[in-house]
């Protein structure tokens, strides 16, 4: 679009549709991670939904592209999960950084020194997964999922480090 050109409704719709498709896949992947974190049986019990319905929420099939997990179900599952996968994804999409309130803090943490050790171990695992993934020149879907899991683990450790540093600063 050049300077002074009007933005056509068609151009705007095309751009909005492209953003929607990008967000769609991102949210579906994090919804799947949430369900797998909690477990499909527990997700069904907590939500009152069937396995098929839960599966549709993270299915990337065209016929389910407009189906998303209701926010009350996300809240119930995230309360039982080890990490707020969907909330984190929504924050990422808006460029927001989250911080925990400490109610689900890792009780095994022994301060910043142990956090640094855990962080370096998780980073080494991420690099190992990455090295393995690129060995054939391309990253498969399963390899990408493993890399995402390791990245999320690092994010959790960094959040714990942040909380420990805040505790030491007060």
Image (cartoon, rainbow, N blue to C red):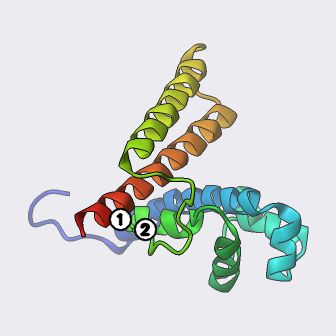
Decide which of 161, 42 is in the foreground and name it.
Answer: 161
- Quarter of the image containing the N terminus? bottom left
Q: What element does badge 2 sit on?
A: helix
Please identify the residue farthest to the left as the structure is shown. 3
Q: Considering depth in this image, is 146 or 163 the residue closer to the camera?
A: 163
Q: Which residue is mark 1?
A: 97
Picture coordinates of residue 146, whole percent (x, y) = 63, 37
In this picture, residue 46 sits left or right of residue 152: right
**Against 132, is 44 above or below?**
below
Viewer-side residue, 104 vs 167: 167
Q: Which residue appears at 51% of the width and 36% of the height?
A: 122
As drawn, 143 above or below 87:
above
The quadrant where residue 34 appears: bottom right
Residue 158 in percent (x, y) is at: 41, 51
Residue 79 higher or lower than 167, as above or below: below
**In the rendered image, the vertical position of residue 54 relative to residue 121, given as above or below:** below
Asked if residue 55 shows in the view, the reply is: yes
What's the distance in space between the residues labelled 2 and 1, CA to CA?
7 Å
* Rendering coords of residue 100 (x, y %): 45, 70
* Residue at the spot of label 2: 91
**Residue 78 position by quadrant:** bottom right
Are the residues tagged 2 and 1 within 8 Å (C-beta)?
A: yes
Mark whose residue sits in front, 2 or 1: 1
């Amino acid at each position: 679009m050049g300077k002074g050109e009007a933005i056509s409704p068609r151009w705007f719709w095309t751009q909005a549709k492209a953003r929607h498709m990008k967000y769609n896949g991102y949210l579906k992947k994090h919804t799947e991670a949430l369900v797998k974190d909690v477990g499909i049986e527990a997700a069904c019990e907590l939500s009152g939904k069937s396995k098929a319905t839960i599966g549709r929420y993270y299915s990337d099939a065209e016929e389910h592209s407009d189906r998303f997990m209701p926010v009350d179900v996300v809240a119930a599952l995230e309360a039982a999960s080890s990490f707020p996968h969907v909330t984190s994804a929504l924050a990422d999409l808006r460029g927001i950084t989250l911080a925990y309130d400490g109610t689900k803090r890792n009780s095994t943490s022994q301060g910043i020194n142990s956090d640094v050790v855990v962080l370096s171990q998780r980073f080494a695992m991420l690099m190992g997964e990455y090295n393995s993934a690129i060995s054939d020149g391309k990253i498969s879907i399963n390899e990408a999922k493993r890399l995402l899991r390791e990245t999320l683990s690092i994010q959790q450790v960094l959040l714990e480090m942040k909380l420990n540093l805040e505790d030491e600063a007060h």
